[in-house]
Image (spheres, rainbow, N blue to C red):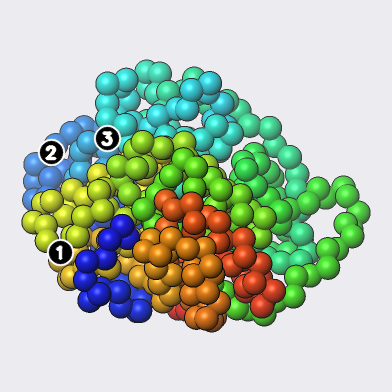
């Protein structure tokens, strides 16, 4: 918060709102791709009128499936197709290896709108064959067309899941991306890439990203087990609002890394637009990215159109930088209502501890606010735009770690509280 002009909203509460939104891809629902088994047509809502004809083996995004008809998206067209003409597609895995980051587009032309960006060394799922220079790919929640020259065949490496724990498989290299399944201890997998601590693995049943630290080479005999961290089970979510900031955010990242802490950054669209590289660095370090509107406006004062614009434009900037939308939302000044909630398909995350770091700009007071109020399940509100906050963080994390706290993202904390 830059300013809180009313104490009304400094409520110490946490609102978790999960919305069921059947017609938009939920941030935690991986996209499903199917391909056509024959030449066919896409029909409009009435199921009478043909919108477009498709050739055999065309990959489509499945929006919803209902009895005989499946709602699909093909390029910019949305419509209905007979379910019997669709089959689950098995993708080819390709490694992103372009000099310039390859852009994901809505259609297979260079002029088409950009909907995302792929990471170098990530693995994408490729469906169908290349028409022109473009192939249809899926990565996490993004699916679209990419220049085929950006992709190369990956090198496969046999690996084994460490015996210490099962591994969660995710749709993208991020702790907040959707869960696809679980790999059991000692399972054998094929690793196709290792991207900043995230490995893409495939087995006969499933494929996706896992934490690379959970894998070992099968030929290595039992590694000396690390002494297990004392586990108290106490978790805290650190949240940083109003960034990214070129200096302060980077200092905070360093301190978080020192304590092996994961946090959530609620970014402002106009700042993220100025510093996409900082945002990407935050994301790639394993932190969660939240939407905090485009220019920190009090949403409850806006028209529906303006409010939507604040949310969507920020997601667009985030997606352009990290290849996926924000997975959580925090309204500026904590101000929201039902209309705003209805526009979101991610949870709203408030806070339980307000450090007031923006107001006093005093590291000691920030430390004190946390020390006095921290408990299991706390969500701490701080701002990564004030040097004084970055300066307080080391002391805060050192004290909390001694008390046995683990620092997790907002989504992970919500996940724990749901169980
Ligand atoms: Zn704010």
Q: Which mark is residue 181?
A: none
- Image quarter (top left, top right, bottom left or bottom right) of the N terminus: bottom left
Relative to 134, 199 lies left or right: right
Closer to the eye: label 3 or 1: 1
Residue at 41% x, 37% y: name it: 275
Q: Could you say which quadrant of the image residue 16 lies in? A: bottom left
- Which percent across, then down, holds residue 145? 37, 30
- Which percent across, then down, holds residue 102? 45, 27
Which of the two labelled residues, at mark 3 and mark 1, occupies the earlier sequence position?
A: 3
Q: Residues within 10 Å of mark 2 (few under 14, many from 20)?
A: some
Image vertical order of residue 8 relative to residue 177, above or below: below
Instruction: Tell me the element at label 1.
Output: helix
Instruction: Tell me the element at label 2.
Output: strand
Whether residue 173 is visible here, answered yes or no, is no
What residue is disc 3 on? 75
Whether residue 297 is visible here, answered yes or no, is yes
Question: Looking at this view, is 3 or 47 the one in front?
Answer: 3
- CB atoms of marks 3 and 1 within 8 Å: no
Residue at 47% x, 63% y: name it: 362
Which of the two labelled residues, at mark 3 and mark 2, occupies the earlier sequence position?
A: 2
C-alpha separation, residue under disc 2 versus residue under disc 1: 42 Å
Relative to 75, 257 lies left or right: right
Closer to the eye: label 3 or 2: 3
Which of the two labelled residues, at mark 2 and mark 1, occupies the earlier sequence position?
A: 2
- Which percent across, then down, holds residue 137? 43, 36
C-alpha separation, residue under disc 3 versus residue under disc 1: 35 Å
What residue is disc 2 on? 50
Instruction: Tell me the element at label 3.
Output: loop
Q: Is disc 3's CB within 8 Å of ligand 1?
A: no
Residue at 74% x, 75% y: name it: 230
What residue is disc 1 on? 300
- CB atoms of marks 3 and 2 within 8 Å: no
């Amino acid at each position: 918060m830059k300013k809180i002009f009313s104490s009304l909203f400094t409520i110490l509460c946490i609102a978790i709102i999960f919305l069921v939104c059947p017609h938009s891809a939920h941030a935690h629902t991986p996209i499903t791709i199917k391909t056509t088994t024959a030449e066919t047509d896409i029909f409009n809502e009435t199921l009478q009128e043909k919108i477009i004809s498709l050739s055999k083996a065309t990959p489509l995004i499945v929006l919803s499936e209902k009895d005989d008809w499946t709602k699909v998206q093909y390029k910019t067209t949305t419509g209905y197709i007979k379910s019997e003409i669709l089959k689950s597609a098995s993708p080819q895995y390709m490694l992103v290896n372009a000099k310039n980051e390859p852009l994901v587009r809505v259609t297979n032309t260079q002029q088409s709108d950009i909907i995302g960006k792929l990471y170098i060394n990530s693995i994408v799922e490729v469906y169908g064959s290349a028409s022109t220079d473009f192939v249809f790919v899926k990565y996490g929640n993004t699916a679209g067309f990419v220049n085929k020259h950006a992709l190369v065949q990956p090198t496969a490496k046999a690996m084994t899941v460490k015996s210490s724990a099962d591994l969660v498989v995710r749709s993208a290299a991020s702790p907040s991306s959707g869960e696809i399944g679980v790999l059991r201890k000692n399972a054998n997998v094929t690793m196709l890439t290792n991207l900043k601590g995230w490995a893409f693995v495939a087995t006969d049943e499933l494929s996706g990203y896992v934490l690379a630290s959970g894998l070992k080479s099968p030929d290595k005999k039992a590694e000396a087990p690390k002494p297990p961290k004392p586990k108290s089970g106490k978790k805290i979510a650190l949240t940083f609002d109003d960034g990214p900031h070129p200096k302060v955010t980077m200092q905070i990242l360093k301190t978080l890394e020192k304590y092996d802490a994961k946090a959530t950054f609620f970014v402002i669209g106009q700042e993220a637009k100025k510093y996409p590289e900082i945002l990407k660095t935050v994301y790639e370090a394993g932190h969660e990215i939240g939407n905090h509107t485009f220019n920190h406006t009090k949403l409850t004062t806006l028209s529906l159109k303006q409010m939507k614009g604040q949310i969507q434009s920020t997601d667009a900037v985030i997606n352009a930088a990290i290849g996926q939308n924000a997975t959580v939302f925090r309204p500026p000044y904590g101000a929201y209502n039902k209309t705003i909630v209805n526009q979101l398909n991610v949870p709203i995350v408030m806070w339980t501890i307000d450090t007031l770091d923006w107001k006093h700009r005093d590291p000691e007071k920030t430390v004190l606010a946390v020390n006095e109020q921290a408990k299991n399940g706390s969500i701490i509100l701080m701002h990564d735009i004030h040097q004084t906050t970055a300066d307080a963080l080391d002391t805060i994390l050192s004290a909390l770690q001694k008390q046995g706290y683990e620092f997790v993202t907002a989504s992970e904390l919500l996940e724990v509280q749901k169980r």
